[in-house]
Amino acid sequence: MDDLYRDYILEHYKRPRNFGELEPHDLENHEHNPLCGDELGVQIRVRDGRIEDLRFQGHGCAISQAAASIASEELKGMAVEEVAELDADWLIELLGIPVSATRRKCALLNLKVVRGAVTGDHSWPA
Amino acid sequence: MRAAAESPAAPGAPAERVAAPNAAVSAGPAGAAELDVRGDFPILAREPEGRPLIYLDSASTSQKPAVVIDALAEHLRAHNANVHRGVYGLAREADAAYDRARGRIAAFTHAEPAETIFTKNVTEAINLVAYAWGRANIGPGDAVLITTMEHHANIVPWQVLCRERGAALRYLEVDGDGLLDPDQLDSELQRGDVRLVAFTHVSNVLGTINPVAEMTGKIRAAGALSLVDGAQAVPQIPVEVEALGADFYAWTGHKALGPTGIGVLHGRREILEEMEPFLTGGDMIASVDFDGATWNELPYKFEAGTPPIAEAVALGVAVDYLAGLGMERVRAHELALTAHLLQRLAEVPGLRVVGPPDPERRGGLASFSIEGIHPHDVAELADRCGVCIRAGHHCAQPLMRRLGMSATARASVGVYNTPADIDALIDALIDGRQVFGL
């Protein structure tokens, strides 16, 4: 069993959930990882203060794509206020794999994009 | 610049270990002459997680032979003092070691010591030209010509200069084989507005070796200046700055078996004499009064502040080591490895190599992508087998855009690599495809 490239990680990488366009949407944001040039965008529809639906657009490594896919399932239905408070540990725990320092930004890019859309804060999740 | 003979050690210069490479020669897989110097590089004796360290990232930075590491430590241990200031014996030792290092470094690339300016790296060398020459000589209606295969270090300084001075920045395009089109250079020069052409000698992504002498001849005939980024070239092919005909030629120590923190800018004397300084302060002045200063002679006019002294001494030993191997043999070694690399990469299903298919037109590297595995994952999978390769945009995002890729994986070789290192990479890539279910 591979520590990093577990079956569910590769499954999400090959068939990412909630990727594509979302129309209409209320929020959107686009960020890139300057280390590798990977780009990720998000479109979010909000209803009654919660994320009703969202879609990611972009490409990247297995870790960044799988992380976005896995996170998207958790983010649906979450209160926008709660999303604004999410930190790096939330995502790393959700992924359930050992993420090395050099791959950390790959894993966190989706949260950076979503938080940026919701709060306007474009810093990396701590 | 003309070819300068190696100057003999100055009297009273500190005794220094002479670089003596173990230049054994054996037959490579393709029957080519091959260096066997891995044992000269202490870091390659490491065995992380019980596996030999296989380093295929020399285009990022080279590993260092023991003679270079020892020279750096020995200078700090026994001969350390500031240069150009002290009257005591120790300061004279430091002066002699520093000046001798410049002489050896200049001789290695067939340049004059006065035309051999120490910088921090290639980035600083190019910025020196962009600021000190560019801001005085480029204006509205002028153009700077670069290529789409440049490293960011040879793009951004020209973008900033051209924006500031109202000049045009234009690009020479790269064809499907990673080569420049000589006709496009001709037609660009015929427009009559080009003041400077800046281009890389060897591309850090495509591997392409550009025909520098042919290009600088045309550029000079058109009344423009040339700047060549030699970061990838100097460590692996014979470089004679005078014969190449470049007005400026920049390279860096850490890719040429030397330490980080020292780069070199060669410039034509008459141009350097006309230029104002780049950075100002100590050491670069002749005299300072309350309301002004006059500049020191070349090369010191462009070396403000305390220079990288121990680094220069160590780089002097590094180029001696390379000269001891013989740059023709270094090139033959890396050419054989590159041919082996291209041949073996072609065995991996779904793998695409960018750049010239002919190894003769390449430096010692290959950038590639594998269908179904992102380059970052390729590098991660290689790392698990103890193989160090790079992944990313290699500081060449405009080129990646032209190639229609966001990133590539890149394997690059140095004097210490062997065909077995490349075979280990190929095994890792084939295993990696299995991990990804391909």
Image (tube, coloured by chain):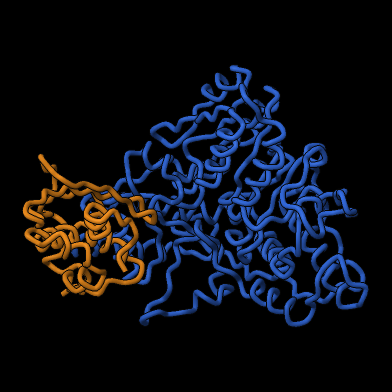
Chain colours: A orange, B blue
> Count the marks: how many?
0
Q: Is residue B217 left or right of residue A31?
A: right
Q: Position of residue B67 (x, y in %)?
A: 66, 73
Q: Is residue B239 left or right of residue A77?
A: right
Q: What residue sits 75% from the left and 48% below the top? A: B110
The image shows residue B231, relative to residue B271, as above or below, that is: below
The image shows residue B241, relative to residue B69, as above or below, that is: above
Quadrant hosting residue B306: bottom right
Q: In the image shown, does B435 or B229 lie closer to the viewer?
A: B229
Q: What residue sits 52% from the left and 55% below the top? A: B334
Q: Position of residue B133 (x, y in %)?
A: 71, 38
Q: Is residue B90 left or right of residue B152?
A: right
Q: Position of residue B267 (x, y in %)?
A: 74, 43
Q: What residue sits 57% from the left and 42% below the top? A: B157
Can residue B159 be seen here? The reply is yes
Can residue B436 be seen here? The reply is no
The image shows residue B319, relative to residue B404, as above or below, that is: below
Q: Is residue A80 left or right of residue B303?
A: left
Which quadrant is the C terminus of chain B positioned in? bottom left
Q: In the image shown, does A36 or A124 lie closer to the viewer?
A: A124
Q: What residue sits 31% from the left and 65% below the top? A: A103
Quadrant hosting residue B71: bottom right
Q: Position of residue B167 (x, y in %)?
A: 59, 28
Which quadrant is the N terminus of chain B positioned in? top right
Q: In the image shown, does A59 or A27 lie closer to the viewer?
A: A27
